[in-house]
Amino acid sequence: MQRRLCAAILSLEAIVLGLSTPVLISVAGVSTATALWIGLGLTVACILVAGLLRFGWAYGLGWAIQVAAIALGFVIHAMFVLGAVFLALWATAYFLGSRIERERAEWAVTGEYPGRVPADPADPADHSHH
């Protein structure tokens, strides 16, 4: 679950960072070559890292992308806000996804799922306790 959630956040972030490229050129006055390296470079990084999340070390790269997105705010001030929003979404996906995976593993071991009614040992029709 963590991998899927984090990959979804990176995919959405790739769109935003890709769209920052023309803003870098037209509003911030960054040269076209530099804007392409920054905007499209971060876009490609998001897509690549989303695909690499099957490896634990790729999550560190995901955190680095969040820092880079916020740092882009020094050039495009709106990116301070957008970067912070994506940082919050990334952190939520990372920690909540991890928690969901832990709880699912625990449920699989114990057989105790939320909302599951415990078996009644006195009920002869219930074969779950045999």
Image: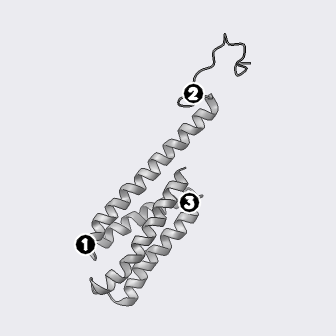
Q: Which residue is mark 2?
A: 116
In the image, residue 91 sits, relative to residue 49, either above or below, namely: above
Q: Are marks 2 and 1 in contact (CB under 8 Å)?
A: no
Looking at the image, residue 40 lies above or below residue 31: above
Quadrant location of the C terminus in the rendered image: top right
Marker disc for residue 99 = none
Which residue sits at x=41%, y=53%? 91
In the displayed structure image, the side of residue 57 where residue 84 appears, left or right: left
Whole-percent x, y for residue 28 in the image:
27, 83
Q: Amino acid at mark 2?
A: Arg
What's the residue type where badge 1 is placed? His
Q: Residue at x 36, y 55 (%)?
A: 88
Mark 3 closeness class: few <14, some 14–19, many ≥20 residues within 10 Å: some
Residue 53 numbered tag: 3
Circle 1: element type: loop
Q: For the point 39% across and 77% down, which residue is it? A: 19
Percent of width and height locating residue 43: 46, 74
From the viewer's perspective, tell me whether residue 110 is left or right of residue 22. Answer: right
Dot in front, 2 or 1? 2
Q: Is residue 73 left or right of residue 34?
A: left
Q: Nearer the viewer, mark 2 or mark 3?
A: 2
Callout 3: SS: loop
Q: Which residue is mark 1?
A: 77
Q: Relative to 96, does residue 20 appear above or below in the rendering?
A: below
Query: Which type of secondary structure does the marked residue at label 2 adopt?
Result: loop
x and y percent of residue 42 in the render? 44, 74
**Residues at circles 3 and 1 in contact by the CB criterion of under 8 Å:** no
